[in-house]
Amino acid sequence: MDKKKTLKIIKIGGNVIDDPMALKSFLRTVSTVQGPKILVHGGGKSATALAEQTGLKVKMIEGRRVTDAVTLELITMVYAGKINKRLVAQLQALKCNAIGFTGADGNTISAEKRPVSSIDYGFVGDVKNVETSTLHLLLKQSICPVFCAITHDNKGQLLNTNADTIASELAIAFANQYQVELYYCFEKKGVLKDINDDNSVIQTITKSSYKKLLETQLIFSGMLPKLNNCFHALEQNVSKVCIGTPEMLLNSESIFTTLTIK
């Protein structure tokens, strides 16, 4: 029954969250998106700012945060508390009924602590399962789930999980029930050829052209996890994956990056 319905999974970038005017505009756009939708957010810049205020040293490796026990407490407060509830409240003000989630709520997203190899990421989780039943009921009632970047291991331990990964795994989990479109929204128009030129948008990236971009080192490190998640989603039957400003949600004629397998 729901296979022909379109579900939009929308991930918001940290720079938009940190800019009150940009955030207000983004949420207004999300509130006008028709049909079922899920919002996913991180909040890395807010967590980093608070860490600096409290004297905690932030360590990033290949665009991913290393999370010790103290850092996990901090990001749980910021992601699941301050940011998540602020987004939900602002969506309610825009007449978009929303409810906040961590992966632990409703047992929606369970993860496994990343094994220690050459790098010890600490309390960082890799998604193992997405349970869609509770979310499906909410979507049928026109309620928008709002996910922060926190999962759990089914043993009482919360885990920090990359928000881009959460968005792609949610998209994959719903791909059999809906025609899923995955949107990564941030402050840039898309993936750029030149990081210093906001107009150098690569409008289409195929899997083969992505390999060439990697070889020529045209893509900066922070974009790598995002693009890897994009192609992983496409390989798992997600119908559409785009990266750009929130304008792309309502205006298909705007400039943004579309990812394709071929």
Image: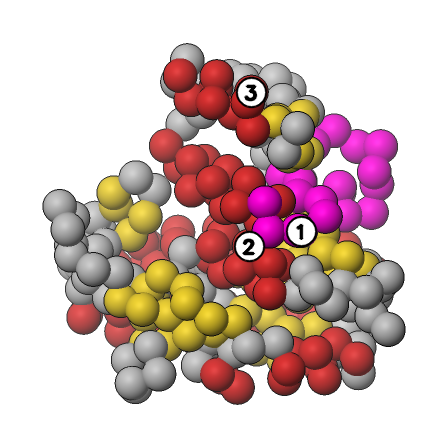
Magenta span covers which residues? 235-257
Q: Please state, as top left, top right, bottom left or bottom right, where the N terminus lies in the image.
A: bottom right
What residue type is disc 1 on? Val
Q: Residues within 10 Å of mark 1 (few under 14, many from 20)?
A: many
Where does label 1 land, which residue?
238
State if disc 1 and disc 2 touch (CB < 8 Å). Answer: yes
Element at label 3: helix
On screen, residue 219 versus residue 253, left or right, reads left
User: What residue appears at the point 30 percent right and 39 percent down from the top-left corner?
Assistant: 62
Where does label 3 land, which residue?
209
Between the C-alphas of marks 2 and 1, the distance is 9 Å
Residue 106 position in % (x across, y down): 53, 86
User: What residue appears at the point 37 percent right and 70 percent down from the top-left corner?
Assistant: 111
Question: Is residue 138 magenta-colored?
Answer: no
Q: Of the residues under marks 2 and 1, which one precedes in the sequence?
A: 2
Question: Is residue 238 magenta-colored?
Answer: yes
Between the C-alphas of marks 1 and 3, the distance is 20 Å
Q: Of the residues under marks 2 and 3, which one precedes in the sequence?
A: 2
User: What residue appears at the point 77 percent right and 73 percent down from the top-left corner?
Assistant: 96
What residue type is disc 2 on? Ser
Between 233 and 146, the one lying in front of the other is: 233
User: What residue appears at the point 50 percent right and 38 percent down from the top-left corner?
Assistant: 227
Mark in the foreground, 2 or 1: 1
On screen, residue 79 versus residue 97, left or right, reads left
- Is residue 24 in view? no
Q: Residues within 10 Å of mark 3 (few under 14, many from 20)?
A: some
Where does label 2 land, which residue?
168
Residue 208 position in % (x across, y down): 55, 22
On screen, residue 45 versus residue 30, left or right, reads left
Q: Please state, as top left, top right, bottom left or bottom right, where the C terminus lies in the image.
A: top right
